[in-house]
Image (cartoon, rainbow, N blue to C red):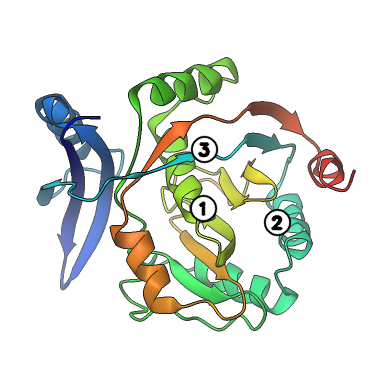
Amino acid sequence: MGKMLSIRMRASRQRGAEEVHISGAEGIYEEGELDRIAGKYLRRATSHPKGEPDRIVLTVERIRERPRLISSLPVATLRCSSTEEAEGHIRALLRELGISDRAAVSAFRVVRAQAAMRGACLMDAATGKRMEPDRKRGVRASRIGTGREAGRLLSSRLSHRGICTDTVREAIILASKVAFWKPVEAELCISDDSDYTTGYVASRRFGYIRIPHIKGKGSHAGGRVFFLGPGADIQKTVAYLENAPVVIGRVSGCRGECSLHEIIGDHHR
């Protein structure tokens, strides 16, 4: 692995005194990929369904710390036909993962907020208490990428299931980094993109579980919650999520549609 760069893009539009997020992207790449990736990110910033941005920030940093190589989470899609069913499935998955009902209620309050946080919420898995240092900013999982061969294999497996989009790929990479950190017991994510209605619950135990119909079409509500176990060191957790470079070096399997019983039952055998 040669010289590596962290390349990040954030596009936004000013609405009065508020800066509204339009799109973002990031990855860890070899130095020779800079021109191609920068061009790709800028094209994404200027062609997003949310409209044209007023501001695009492209950040390029050299990775000086050797990235940790991890496996991607296994992927499955939960069979689901309505937002009510999706909520029931989410609550069942979280309960199986040891997340209290109280914390689940608090998490739904975060991910259904119309004014989405810029980053993720850190939440105590038992009490539902929010633990991120800055509630407005949240915590941003960053400095993530895939090795070249792993990236190709991940795309191939997602393509086989008809779900190989930038949105899905990038979410799996992010969720895999988050789940690798032992104090994180689970993650719940709903995109604030009004046209994207598939969210996910991710964990080391069940993997990356895609959940269709997690919200109604046209809704701008969305957010991300990382549930933390007892005794989690918040300072170390934030430092890992935001600054530790992590690269997917191995790719796990990708299943098609599964029932909730299949997903939970497979892990009780």
Label 2 SS? helix
The residue at 20%/46% (across/down) is: 8
In the rendered view, tell whether residue 178 sits above or below residue 80.
below
| Tag 3 residue | 72
Q: Nearer the viewer, mark 3 or mark 2?
A: 3
Residue 186 falls left or right of residue 221: right
Is residue 73 among the parts visible in the rendering? yes
Q: Quadrant of residue 262?
A: top right
Q: Nearer the viewer, mark 1 or mark 2?
A: 1
Residue 16, horizontal then vertical, whole percent: 15, 69
Give, as a three-letter code, the residue at label 3: Ser
| Tag 1 residue | 180
Label 1 SS? helix
Q: Earlier in the sequence, mark 3 or mark 2?
A: 3
Give, as a three-letter code, the residue at label 2: Ile
Q: Quadrant of the C terminus?
A: top right
| Tag 2 residue | 90
Rate crowding at label 2 as few (under 14), some (14 to 19) or many (20 or more) other CA atoms within 10 Å. Answer: many
Q: Which mark is residue 121?
A: none
Q: Quadrant of residue 120?
A: bottom left
Q: Quadrant of residue 14?
A: bottom left
Extreme residue in the right direction:
269
Residue 244, horizontal then vertical, whole percent: 32, 56
The residue at 53%/26% (across/down) is: 163
In the rendered view, tell whether residue 77 sits above or below residue 179.
above
Residue 119 falls left or right of residue 108: left
Label 3 and label 1: CA atoms lie apart by 9 Å
Residue 167 falls left or right of residue 23: right
Label 3 and label 2: CA atoms lie apart by 21 Å
Viewer-nearest residue: 24 or 175: 175
